[in-house]
Every structure is written in structure tokens, then in C-alpha cells.
Amino acid sequence: MSEELKVSLKRTCRLAGVSRSAACERRRHATRAPKPRCRPGPVGAMSDKELLAEIRRVLTDSPFIGEGHRKGGHACAATVT
């Protein structure tokens, strides 16, 4: 911001109507490359698509109506290991 204009940061911020901390934060984010978004946590035994397909298969093969997440989770864990 003030690097390009050869004017002090204080004066530039006063004229722009922003705080110095906001200007510095904006400049810092502008020079940094954006991080690719990814799922947090460790990688599991299978991809998300495979896991979703396995969950749906377990629930459709289940003889119970409205099977809970615990029974479905246990059934999926038994097929993965």
C-alpha cells in the first residue's frame, strides 16, 4: 500500500479511512499464496467417496429400519479391517 505510493502508512490509512492493523493484515494476505482447502485430520483407510458408498451399502443391506450411527459405524469398521 504505502510501498507503492512512497507515503507513510499512517497517512495512507488516515486518507483511506482504515486502521493500520487492517492495512498490514490486508498487505500480508495479499503477498501470501492461498492454501488449498483440504479436510482436516489424518487420512483414513479409504477415500471419502468410497466411505460414503460403503456406508450406504451397509445401511441398505441392514435388516433394521432406522439403524443408528453406532451400528452402521461398527458394521463399516468390521468391513474395513
Image (cartoon, grey):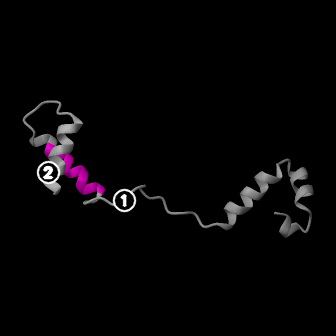
Amino acid at the residue labelled 2: Ala
Q: Is residue 67 left or right of residue 30?
A: left
Q: Quadrant of residue 3?
A: bottom right
Residue at position x 18%, y 41% from top? Answer: 72
> Within the magenta stretch, is there residue 51?
yes
Residue density around tag 1, few if under 14, some if 14–19, many if 20 or more, within 10 Å:
few
From the top left corner, tell me how far across and down residue 55 is, in percent.
20, 46
Residue at position x 16%, y 57% from top? Answer: 81
Number of numbered callouts drawn: 2
* Residue corresponding to mark 2: 78
Q: What secondary structure is marked by label 1? A: loop
Q: Which residues are magenta?
A: 48-58
From the top left corner, tell me how far across and down residue 22 is, in percent.
76, 52
Residue at position x 82%, y 49% from top? Answer: 19
Give the prevailing secondary structure in the magenta stretch. Answer: helix
Relative height, residue 24 to residue 5 (above, below): above
Amino acid at the residue labelled 1: Pro
